[in-house]
Amino acid sequence: MPRAGAQDVDAIAGKRVVFLGDSITQAGGYVAFTTYYLEKLYPKKDFDILGLGLASETVSGLSEDGHAGGQFPRPCLFERLGRVLEKAKPEVVVACYGMNDGIYLPLDKERMAAFQKGITKLIEQCKAAGAKQIVLVTPPIYDAVPKGTEVDYDAVLAEYAKWETGLKVPGSG
């Protein structure tokens, strides 16, 4: 892992950093590792990091039929984002979405457009609430090996990631 430079660390030290995402973020592994890494390498700096991921969440607002045994649709970030931004008042937002936004189906123009619209809306709302920096974390690999006619979902996530990494948004990392 490349070591963060002093100017990179100063960009987040002493600032409220909020991690948003789905169950991968809620599980806390990479959030805890990031916090540990920063505190271990820079013990004289203060880091204020909150992991606020929510399992099954999307930015697309999409949900497959029968999600959670048909009990409820996938939650959408925008149902809670205003409250999160108001209460947490982040200066830096780190967001990892995409895993659930494709609904585990083949790449589709409408689902891709819903994901793109959601990421754009996320950036706009975070900036409007005063976030100075937004870091988009592309969806991780989907390591299931497709069998027969199963979907190569990793290819779907790779397209989502390709679009995200091509964004040119001031204040995004």
Image (cartoon, helix red, strand yellow):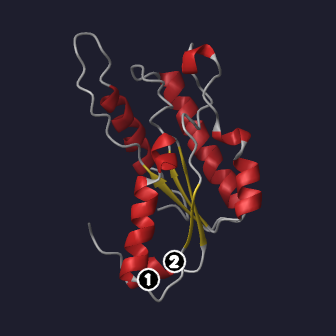
Q: Residue 144: which disc?
A: none
Q: Is residue 101 above or below residue 84?
A: above
**How far is mark 2 from mark 1, CA to CA?**
6 Å
Q: How many marks?
A: 2
In the picture of the structure, the residue carrying the numbered disc 2 is 11
Helix, strand or loop status at disc 1: helix
Q: Is residue 107 above or below residue 120?
A: above
Q: Position of residue 88 (x, y in %)?
A: 70, 62
The reply to whether callout 2 and callout 1 are in contact (CB within 8 Å) is yes
Helix, strand or loop status at disc 2: loop
Left or right: 49, with 33 as reference point: right
Q: Position of residue 167 (x, y in %)?
A: 47, 51
Q: Is residue 84 above or below residue 158?
A: below
Q: Residue 7: which disc?
A: 1
Q: Position of residue 107 (x, y in %)?
A: 40, 23
**Quadrant of the drawing holding the N terminus:** bottom left
